[in-house]
Each structure stands twice: as C-alpha cells, then as structure tokens.
Amino acid sequence: MSDLDLSAEIRQIRGTFATIAEVSDLPKLEKEIAQLKIEAQEPTLWDNPESAQKVTSALSRKQAQINRINEIASRLDDLEVLISLANSESDKSAANEATAELANLKKLVAEQEVLTLLNGEYDSRAAIITIRSGAGGDDATDFAEMLMRMYLRFSEKQSWPSQVLDISFAEGAGIKSATFEIDAPYAYGQLSVEAGTHRLVRMSPFNAAGKRQTSFAAVEVVPLIEQTDVVDIPENDIRIDVFRSSGPGGQSVNTTDSAVRITHLPTGTVVSCQNEKSQLQNKAAAMRVLQSRLLELRRTEEEATKKQLAGDATASWGDQMRSYVLAPYQMVKDLRTNFEVNNPDAVFDGDLSGFIAAGIRWRKTPSN
C-alpha cells in the first residue's frame, strides 16, 4: 500500500485554524474565563439574580468557545499520529479512518471559522423562532409545519435544547403559526440568517388534479431576552387574555383556561403561550417572548435609522430568501447567497449547516 499523504490538506486546515485562534485571542479568553469562574464561586453571587445570570451566561459561552478550539487542536494532532501509524504499518483501516477524520475536521474548522464572524450585540444569545404560513392554502400551512420540523431537527442534530411555546393548528393540514425557543449559545447569531420569506414549489398533495402549487411561509428570528436587558413594558401598555389551549385532543392542558395571550398595545405585537399547564408559567413564557420581540424591534429600528442617516434605505433582505423546489426538479436554493443543494429531503430533515454558514458569510460582506 502506498503511503497516505494528507500533508497539504492538513497544512491548509492548520493555517485556517491558526487564524481562528488568533482572532479568538486565546490568552485573553483564558483570563476572562478564570475571572468569571472566580465571580461564579462567590457565595453572594445569586443575591443579585441579574448579575448572576450575566456571569454564568458569559462563562458558559466562553468555555464552549475555548472547548471547541481545544478539541480541534487535539484532533489535528491525533490525526497526524494516525496517518503516521497507517503508513508505518501499511494499515488500510487506519488510512480510511484518517481520511474520514480529515473530512470531519474540515467541517469543524469551517464551522468554527463561521462562528468567529458572529460578533453582533445579540449573536451569542439563544433564539426564539416564529413561523407563519402565507399564501397557498393547505400547502402553505403544511409547509409551515415542515419548516418547524426542519428547525427542530437541526437543533436536535446540534444537541441544542428546544421548546415549543405555542402552536396554532390549521383547520386542514399543518399549522397557521408556531413559536419555539432554541436555548443554545450563538443560536440567534446562526439562525438569524434564516429570517425571511420561504417559498415551496411542489406537486400539491391537497389538489385532486395533482397540479404544481407554490406556497409561502414567513420565518421570524429574535434573540432571547435576558434579565440584564432593559425593555420597560408599563402595565397599561399590555392586554392579557386567557383561554383554553387548542390542539389535538387528549391533552391535559386543554382542560383549563391556562393559555395566555398578551397584546402590546403601542406596537400591536401579539404573543401567546399554551405549552405549560399553569397559567402563571404560560404568562411568564409569553412575557419573555414579548420582551424578546420588542428588543428586536428596537434593534431593527436603530439599524434602519443608521441606514437612513447613511443614505441607504434599501432593505438588504429580499421578499423571498429561499426556494424549496420539489417539482419538476429537486433543489433548495438560497436566493441571497446562491448556495444550493439537490437534496430537499436532507434539508427538511435539518441539514442546514451549509445554508447557515453561507448566510453568515454573505451578511458580513461589505455590500450587505
């Protein structure tokens, strides 16, 4: 067996990784973690819950960041040892293992490179995603449910905890809308590029003639509010309604008026939560979602003002940011980045990493 030579590819990965490590400033990161650990061990830390949450959240994010970097460094070293072993003993299985590990490391380094671009004010936050069906009847409500499953599957594959907060079921198929929380560091920074209008083209399963149907769904992504954020909501600015939870029968949450709907009167923002059995729990969850949306509204208004002052009032996101085509051919294409794949089934099963990475890079280009 000829010697396995992956030296050129490993040099390229190490070059990219060295840039990532430099941008991440590991010595500074380690000092910050050490200081946060000291603060987290203070007996009086939770005397001030807001300050405690800020400390523990920052520590979790920074530890996750340095752990990812250290893991890549260790696996690169192990890979070179594995290649040496494969060559010295002409071990075909070790050579195959080394080739597979190289592919995995390329993917890990590319993902970490993308994460270094997430330096926005709220990028490190967890995310709240709301999906709403648009034009297209039953196809649109079915599409909305497909998108919800897609994001939940993506989160599951990343080992990110998720929680559905509210679902409004359609009379026919699918859902009118859904709101769910993805609680992981940098979930918002990554998933925020998914916001916009999504379009589905397929042979309709709801049409007796089996004609091709185009349908739409809107995806909204906002950062999860933290207790350290200041979003003042006077009591007079909100209306709270309680109602009985809806959905498939047999659920214990359907037996009492535990669901909560909160309307923010000045902006017309409406949120609801029916996931919990307790009205108090649903109210707390709904308030958290409302505060997150108001925080995002404030952020977008500030950005719009900045663009107007700079003489650029053109929206950078098109009405249709992605197309999912199932007929007459198979393709999913992002219309902003031109990233595309020819396997819609994999995408709907949560294979979104390529689209997200392309979206983050696109967002960081000077023209955007």
Image (spheres, rainbow, N blue to C red):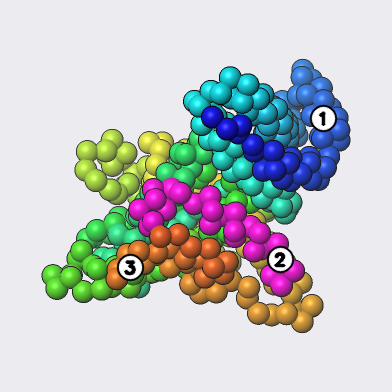
Q: Quick one: 108 or 247, which is closer to the camera?
A: 108
Q: Nearer the viewer, mark 1 or mark 3?
A: 3
Query: Would you say 331 lies left or right of 290 here?
Result: left
Furthest residue in direction front, as rendered = 1
Pick whichever of labels 2 and 3 is earlier in the sequence.
3
Locate residue 11, reporting x and y percent.
73, 41
Residue name at image x 67 percent, y 28 percent: 80
Callout 1: SS:
helix
Which span is picked out in magenta?
343-368
Q: How many marks?
A: 3
Instruction: List the residue tagged with mark 3.
Output: 329
Which disc, if any, is residue 365?
Answer: 2
Report if residue 357 is visible in the image: yes
Instruction: List the residue tagged with mark 1.
Output: 30
Mark 2: which amino acid? Thr
Residue 312, picture quadrant = bottom right
Q: Nearer the viewer, mark 2 or mark 3?
A: 3
Query: Would you say 186 lies left or right of 21 here?
Result: left
Mark 3: which amino acid? Tyr
Discs 2, 3 touching: Cβ within 8 Å: no
Locate residue 348, reporting x and y percent.
39, 53
Residue name at image x 66 percent, y 50 percent: 114
Instruction: State the CA–CA distance, disc 1 to disc 2.
Output: 30 Å
Locate residue 315, reporting x and y percent.
63, 76
Residue name at image x 36 percent, y 67 percent: 325
